Image (cartoon, rainbow, N blue to C red):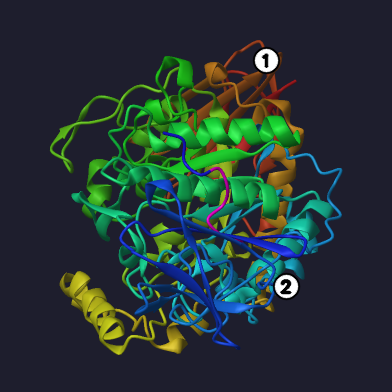
Amino acid sequence: MKTVNNRPGITLNGNEASVLLWAPKAKQVSIKIQNSNEQLPLEQQPYGYWQLKTDKLHAGTQYKFVLDDEKELPDPASLHQPDTVHGPSEVVDLQAIQWTDNNWQNLPLQDYILYELHTGTFTPNSTFAGIEAKLDYMVELGVNAIEIMPVAQFPGNRNWGYDGVFPYAVQNSYGGAGGLQRLVDACHQKGIAVVLDVVYNHMGPEGNYFGEFGSYFTEKYNTPWGNAINFDDAGCDAVRHYFIENVLMWFRDFHIDALRMDAVHAIKDFSAVHILSEIRTRVNELMQETGRKHYLIVECDLNDTRFLNPQNVGGFAMDSQWIDEFHHALRLAAGGEPTGYYSDFSGVTDLAKSYQDAYVYDGQYSAHRDKHFGIKAENNPGEQFIVFSQNHDQVGNRMLGERSSELFSFEMQKLMAGAVLTAPFLPMLFMGEEYSEPHRFMYFVSHTDAELAEAVRKGRKAEFAAFHAQGEAPDPVDEKTFIDSQLQWNLPELGQHSTMLSFYKALIQLRKSLPALHNLNRKQVKAEANEEQKTVVLRRKHHVQEAIVLMNFSGNIQSLSLPDTAQTWKKQFDSADTQWNGPKAAPEVVNGGDGVELQPESFIIYINE
């Protein structure tokens, strides 16, 4: 069966509006124009769809759907919710913007240096315009791809974004559809790609009216956040169509360069063609039509290369994935506590393994999971993996939301940055880490449903009841929790913060300019750990150039020998240099076979002469 081949909701084409709604439960459907109360009946179509073409709907018209003359509901494919998730939807003309990025070409994926940010806490005004005002800062920092946490409409003005209930509507308080389009256009003018985080594994609770229209959810499976979205049960064709068209909308109408799909391990689909594979096929068709390049990035904790492998060998052909295991190993190496899921990791040994193999667990027994876990990722290139020392999850899911700046010393923060930015994978920073932002990034919501808000508050307290010695979990509903999570833009020019920012700029520039670091050939990577010394030696090659990264995670000076006695090694970067407020710089040139003293919590990069 072929589903209706256009976008759900209301699409404007000149003076005519096309309306498409999937409501298989309804016996009759009309659209109610809010300011006049006029109702326009929709015509029933096969497979539960309802359709209308009319000249009575224009940009700015507010409306609701009326099902069977009794239920008045916002549009599940609404493009704008001007007055909360419960209010009327508003017609938006996605073609109204005058794009100036016609010459923009998406960057090669292997060149991406990602910067994850949250629109609400990135700047004090919590808007896309606020991000736009900081683009020159991003360019100077050296990042070339911003990854924006989810912007689908959620209740109130404060939310991480994973409680969205209108996947097509851009959060009104951030600036709506037009604000996001203008931001993307401005990013492209500055040479910055835009990655948008989207959630296709669950929906938020408040304002979730999907069940009133049709079987968007299935009881066959559950996710940690409630019933799973129906990708393979009765009625799933229309649900698949809904989400596929959402992907295409972001790329076609918003010029988004890549999507980061949240927790795809929670997408349950036993169809012959998995929904991710179908999305891949449809995106390929769109790229063929437009000549523009778009990437699909997934968050996935299954250590399963099927998500990355080409479709002709049964894979879903996703372009890249986050690997949390690199993060976990790095945190343990840096001295983090081996509690919870960190208990599976050993620090420097597992960090060296991740450099070498991407996945730490690729078939061995995991005590935390109590099973053998993962598969080897031998044939997947470096750009298929994204690594980081912190991200919204790993910071914000801590009880107090502490960043690395609070948990680790200044020297260790520099070492962790070096571990990420010299990796043979795509590096990602979390907003503010580049200047050691001390403000925590905490969990916050602004549900307008008082009962739900109280349930979230109690749930957060219960989740961390065992940690009561560390204090109280911050109240996620209190606006202060949100404000205290915002970046402090006066800091990058001050003291140690300024030093850290300069350090990040220099390190990012080195990664871009040094072929042995810039090229992501995993066949030319060697990594060795010494548990006793708490050191890692990472070697990366491109053609004749070899870079060697010496890392010392211990609190003592450690001596490491440089390999290849016939070689001379020239220093490129030293985190212990006094220009970075370090204790002492290492020699500029070292002969192969000679030892180098590594300062505590530091790294040095040498290349062969």
Question: Circle 1: is it few (<14), some (14-19), or many (20+) Cα within 10 Å?
Answer: some
Does residue 535 belong to the magenta stretch?
no
Q: Quadrant of the C terminus?
A: top right
Rendered view: 124 above or below 257: below
- Tell me which amino acid carries mark 1: Gln
Q: Residue furthest left?
A: 370
Rendered view: 347 above or below 173: above
Question: Circle 2: is it few (<14), some (14-19), or many (20+) Cα within 10 Å?
Answer: some
- Tell me which amino acid carries mark 2: Ala
User: Horizontal and vertical percent for residue 173?
Assistant: 59, 79
User: Horizontal and vertical percent for residue 332?
Assistant: 34, 48
Secondary structure beneath dot 2 equals: helix
Residue nearer the viewer, 599 or 525? 525
Mark 2 vs mark 1, foreground winner is 2
Q: Quadrant of residue 284?
A: top right
Q: What residue would you read off at disc 2?
A: 129
Where does the magenta region start and end?
5-10
Residue 567, numbered label: 1
Residue nearer the viewer, 295 or 243? 243
